[in-house]
Each structure stands twice: as C-alpha cells, then as structure tokens.
Image: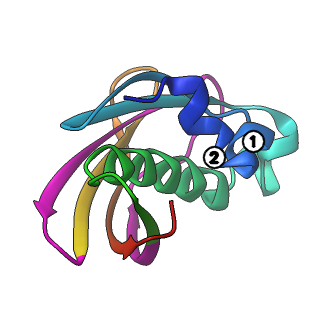
Amino acid sequence: MPSSDDLLALMPFSLELGVRLESAEPDEVVGTVEWSPQRCTSGGVLHGGVLMALADTLGAACAFLNLAEGYSTSTIESKTNFFRAVRSGTVRGTSRPLHRGRTTIALSTELRDDTDRLVALVIQTQAVLAGRG
C-alpha cells in the first residue's frame, strides 16, 4: 500500500494547495487543508474550490486504495453541498467508499471545521480505468 506522501505525489495540485494526509486506508482517508488568505475569496472566506479540491483529493486517494493492481481512477462526477463558511483554522476531511464496483467507485467526503461543524458534504464518482496505472 502506498504511503500518504506517495499518494499526494500522484496529485501535485493538492500539494500546491497544502493538502496533507493524516491517514489513508481503503475504508477511510483523512486529510486537512489550512485556511490562509491566499486561499480565500471575498471577506476572508476559504474558497469553495479549495474545499472541493480537498474533497476530490481525499476521494481520489480512497478510490485508488480500492483498485486492483494495474488500474487507475479519475473523477467523473462530483456534487458538493456547502453548509458554512471557513474564516480561520483547519478543515479536516474524511472520505469513505459508498460503492466499490468494477467500473466505478462512489465516495462520500465530509469536511469539518476546527469545532467539528460540517462545512461541506461531497459525493463523487470515480471511474475505474484499466491499464493506466
């Protein structure tokens, strides 16, 4: 099983955003991103794109850990519900598989703030791609 650093190395944009993985197992991937002014939209609110990128990174890592050898994955659909703004601190995300199929893997990712309030919920589908890993 690849290390957290190896998983993030597969997604250089995530490294650029400052995403960090705390744990990575097939049943659950946990990671964080820090609030910073450079990652904000107006009013000092963490940009929704940063939140979506965190969720996509965690979901992709979780999907990857559920693949057979020689397969890769790619996001084909993502649905995000935003519930509250993040104006400071750290966002912690947890991604878990909902469905592990032969051609798709569906995942649920919860994003929470420093006080464990739900910031966003993301449901995504990853395609299972043969021979591209």
Q: Residue at x 18, y 37 (%)?
A: 27
Q: Which mark is residue 17?
A: 1
Along the horizontal axis of the image, is 31 left or right of 124?
right
Q: Quadrant of residue 123?
A: bottom left
Along the horizontal axis of the image, is 96 left or right of 44?
left
Q: Which mark is residue 89?
A: none
Q: Inspect the magenta stretch and tell me whether residue 87 lies in it.
A: yes
The amino acid type of the residue labelled 2 equals Leu
The percent coordinates of residue 54 (x first, y second) are 54, 47
Q: Residue at x 39, y 55 (%)?
A: 83
- The residue where tag 2 is placed is 10
Q: How would you classify the magenta stretch by its main secondary structure?
A: strand
Local secondary structure at mark 2: loop
Q: Quadrant of residue 42?
A: bottom right
Discs 1/2, front = 2
Cα separation between marks 1 and 2: 14 Å
| Residue 45 visible to the viewer | yes
